[in-house]
């Protein structure tokens, strides 16, 4: 039994201990609105929502770390804290997707409209 932990900024989501299929597809979509301070996570058939105290915006020029727990700025990576998987589709948008768009992505449905990247 394992938990799945998703961390972003000053908050984290930990799913309950459960049985997760290895060597299979996991669908995940994370929405964050800097304007409303709301975040929503679509993970397979589950939806988690909440508020955050994160920054007003994220400025360019830094690093985006995916699949690795960073213990200190610019480093501090430990192999045992890394994602051992293949990320098949990663998209970053310049706006928060609507709930309908995120749901379409998280259940692998084709989007009815293509959001600008």
Image (cartoon, grey):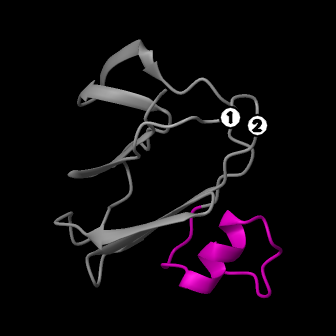
Please tell me whether residue 115 is drawn above or below residue 12 in the rendered image: below
Please tell me whether residue 95 is drawn above or below residue 24 in the rendered image: below
From this viewpoint, is residue 116 visible? Answer: no
How many numbered marks are there? 2
Please tell me whether residue 99 is drawn above or below residue 14 in the rendered image: below
Q: Locate residue 14 relative to residue 103 in the image: left or right.
A: left
Label disc, if present, on residue 103 of the rendered structure: none
**Residue range corresponding to the magenta coloring:** 92-117
State if disc 1 and disc 2 touch (CB < 8 Å): yes
Query: Residue, x 70% and y 33% (percent of image)?
Result: 86
Rounded to the nearest whole Å, what is the CA distance between mark 2 and mark 1? 6 Å
Measuring from the top left, give residue 51's x and y in whole percent: 24, 72
Give 35 or 3, whichever is nearer the viewer: 3
Q: Quadrant of the C terminus?
A: bottom right
From this viewpoint, is residue 14 visible? Answer: yes
- The kind of secondary structure element at disc 1 is loop
Query: Residue, x 75% and y 81% (percent of image)?
Result: 114
From the image, tell me which residue sits under label 2: 24
Q: Locate residue 41 relative to residue 29 in the image: left or right.
A: left
The quarter holding residue 50 reads bottom left
- The kind of secondary structure element at disc 2 is loop
Measuring from the top left, give residue 101's x and y in whole percent: 65, 80
From the image, tell me which residue sits under label 1: 21
């Amino acid at each position: 039994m394992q938990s799945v932990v998703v961390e972003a900024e000053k908050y984290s989501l930990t799913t309950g201990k459960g049985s997760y299929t290895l060597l299979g597809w996991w669908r995940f979509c994370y929405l964050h609105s800097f304007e409303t301070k709301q975040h929503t996570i679509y993970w397979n058939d589950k939806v988690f929502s909440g508020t955050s105290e994160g920054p007003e915006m994220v400025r360019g020029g830094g690093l985006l770390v995916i699949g690795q727990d960073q213990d200190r700025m610019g480093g501090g990576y430990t192999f045992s804290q890394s994602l051992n998987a293949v990320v098949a589709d990663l998209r970053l948008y310049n706006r928060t997707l609507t709930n309908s768009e995120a749901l379409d992505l998280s259940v692998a449905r084709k989007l009815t409209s293509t959001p600008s990247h």
